[in-house]
Image (cartoon, rainbow, N blue to C red):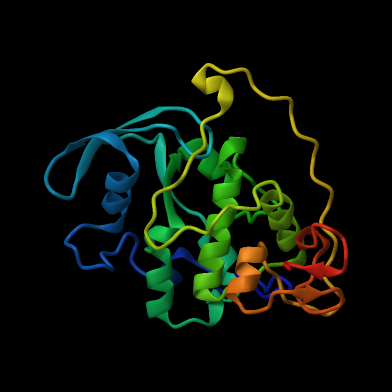
Amino acid sequence: MLLDVKGRAPKTGYTRAQFGQAWFDTDRNGCDTRNDILRRDLQEREMANACKVLAGTLAPDPFTGASIRFGEGSTQVDIDHVVALSDAWQKGAASWPGEKRLAFANDPLNLLAVDSSANRAKSDGDTATWLPPYKPFRCSYVARQVAVKGKYGLWVTSAERDAMTRVLATCPTMATPGPGSAPTVAVAPEAAGQPAPAPAPEPAPAQPEPTGSSVYYANCTAARAAGAAPIMRGEPGYASRLDRDGDGVACE
């Protein structure tokens, strides 16, 4: 998926109210967005009616890997904007009409039920400044950020692009999630009663894109979907991580 690379714009003028009514029923199904996400992400649900979730279990929580019991009045589960509203504001959303910001803030693709403490630690961080403590979810998390930013035409900073590249290089077959999809959380081997493998070495820092290029492909699947493959060294979008045999031709 192609994302533009630019600098972060000022946060001037940002407020939560710029994204409209919280948990607005944008899909007109009669249920607010918060309860839509709780129904999607929680197991063992107890319902007050067709919409309202009274209780359930988040197992596992995608940010921490823990199992969390949610109940009415509980403060242990938040609904996270995977791409934070403030981050979106600084990377394109400030110029959007109100209707697009409302849709973005309530899009199930950009929403996950998560541990509240981890969510508050994240704040409005992007991939360059925050990743889930639970490492088996990091690829899925970054792929979802790529999908959201691609869908809405938001850009990334160069530091964010490099951080995304480092994470996705560890899972080259990871596909971006589709609209409304639930989170995919890998189970750590030790949780399944198996010995954990030796830790993999940290991936080498991604090679920078050619100077002046704002073309970025998360993987070769994205490059082919954009009709750009194969990509020669020096062409927009070329990156050494896509050139597995080092012959100067990526995504052959």
Between 251 and 160, the residue placed more toward the observer is: 251
Q: Residue at x 79, y 57 (%)?
A: 244
Tell me the quarter of the picture where residue 44 sits.
top left
Number of labels in the image equals: 0
Is residue 46 in view?
Answer: yes
Q: Residue 231 location, x and y as percent? A: 76, 75
- Outermost residue, left side: 49
Between 213 and 39, the residue placed more toward the observer is: 213
Q: Residue 216 location, x and y as percent? A: 70, 70
Q: Residue at x 79, y 71 (%)?
A: 238
30 relative to 57, above or below: below
Q: Residue 193 location, x and y as percent? A: 52, 16
Q: Is residue 33 left or right of residue 155?
A: left
16 relative to 131, above or below: below
Q: Residue at x 64, y 22 (%)?
A: 196
The quarter of the image holding the C terminus is: bottom right
177 relative to 194, above or below: below
Q: Is residue 241 left or right of residue 80?
A: right
Between 70 and 138, the residue placed more toward the observer is: 138
Q: Residue 214 location, x and y as percent? A: 74, 77
Q: Is residue 74 left or right of residue 127?
A: left
The quarter of the image holding the N terminus is: bottom right
Is residue 86 in view?
Answer: no
Tell me the quarter of the picture where residue 91 sits.
bottom right
Q: Residue at x 13, y 49 (%)?
A: 50
182 relative to 17, above or below: above
Q: Is residue 105 left or right of residue 164?
A: left
